[in-house]
C-alpha cells in the first residue's frame, strides 16, 4: 500500500474554538470527538486532531488545496468575519491574495498559519 498521511495533531489553546473555527471557515463538517482529541476531517481522509495545550507551543502551518469555487466561498467567510489575511506566509502583504493560482494565509485562534490555495506549488 502506498504511504498516506492519516492525521496530524494540532495543539490549541481551546480545541473546541480552534477546530470549530476552521470547520466553519473551510465549510467542512463539524469536528468530532475521538478520545481527548477533536478531529476535523478533510475530503482526502486526513484529519486534523486538535488537542488542548497550556502554555507556549510552536505554531504550525497547514495548507488546504481547494477548487476555485471553494476558494471563493472560503474567502467570503474570511472577509465577512473581518479576519486579517495575507498573500504570503511571512504575513508581509496584508489584504492581498497571491497569484500562484490563488491563495492566501490567515491565523486561527491559536496562532497557526492557515493557507488556502487553488494550485499545488510546482504545478
Image (tube, grey):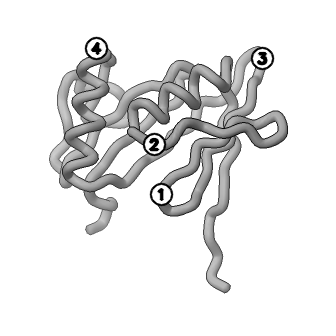
Q: Considering only order in the chain, which callout, 1 or 4, is on the residue closer to the N terminus? A: 1
Q: Which mark is residue 54?
A: 3
Q: For mark 2, what is the residue?
A: 28
User: Which quadrant of the view contains residue 33?
Assistant: top right
Does residue 90 appear in the picture of this structure? Answer: no
Q: Position of residue 102 (x, y in %)?
A: 20, 47
Q: State the separation of the CA atoms marked 1 and 3.
A: 30 Å
Query: Depth-wise, is mark 2 or mark 3 nearer the camera?
Result: 2
Image point (26%, 55%), residue name: 67
Q: Position of residue 24 (x, y in %)?
A: 43, 30
Image-based side of 106 in relation to 74, left or right: right
Q: For mark 1, what is the residue?
A: 43
From the viewer's side, name the closer residue of 60 and 6. 6
Q: Considering only order in the chain, which callout, 3 or 4, is on the residue closer to the N terminus? A: 3
- The secondary structure type at the circle numbered 4 is loop
- The secondary structure type at the circle numbered 2 is loop
From the viewer's side, name the closer residue of 98 and 49. 49
Does residue 78 appear in the picture of this structure? Answer: yes
Image point (44%, 25%), residue name: 107
Q: For mark 4, what is the residue?
A: 82
When the figure is inspected, residue 120 is found, relative to residue 70, above or below; the finding is below
From the viewer's side, name the closer residue of 103 and 47. 47
Q: Considering only order in the chain, which callout, 3 or 1, is on the residue closer to the N terminus? A: 1
Amino acid at each position: 500500500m502506498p504511504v498516506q498521511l492519516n492525521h496530524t495533531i494540532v495543539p490549541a489553546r481551546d480545541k473546541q474554538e480552534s477546530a470549530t473555527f476552521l470547520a466553519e471557515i473551510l465549510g467542512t463538517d463539524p469536528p468530532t470527538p475521538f478520545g481527548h482529541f477533536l478531529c476535523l476531517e478533510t475530503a482526502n481522509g486526513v484529519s486534523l486532531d486538535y488537542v488542548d495545550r497550556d502554555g507556549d507551543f510552536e505554531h504550525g502551518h497547514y495548507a488546504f488545496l481547494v477548487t476555485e469555487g471553494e476558494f471563493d466561498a472560503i474567502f467570503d467567510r474570511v472577509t465577512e468575519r473581518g479576519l486579517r489575511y495575507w498573500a504570503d506566509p511571512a504575513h508581509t502583504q496584508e489584504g492581498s491574495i497571491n497569484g500562484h493560482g490563488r491563495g492566501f494565509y490567515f491565523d486561527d485562534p491559536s496562532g497557526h498559519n492557515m493557507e488556502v490555495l487553488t494550485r499545488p506549488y510546482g504545478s
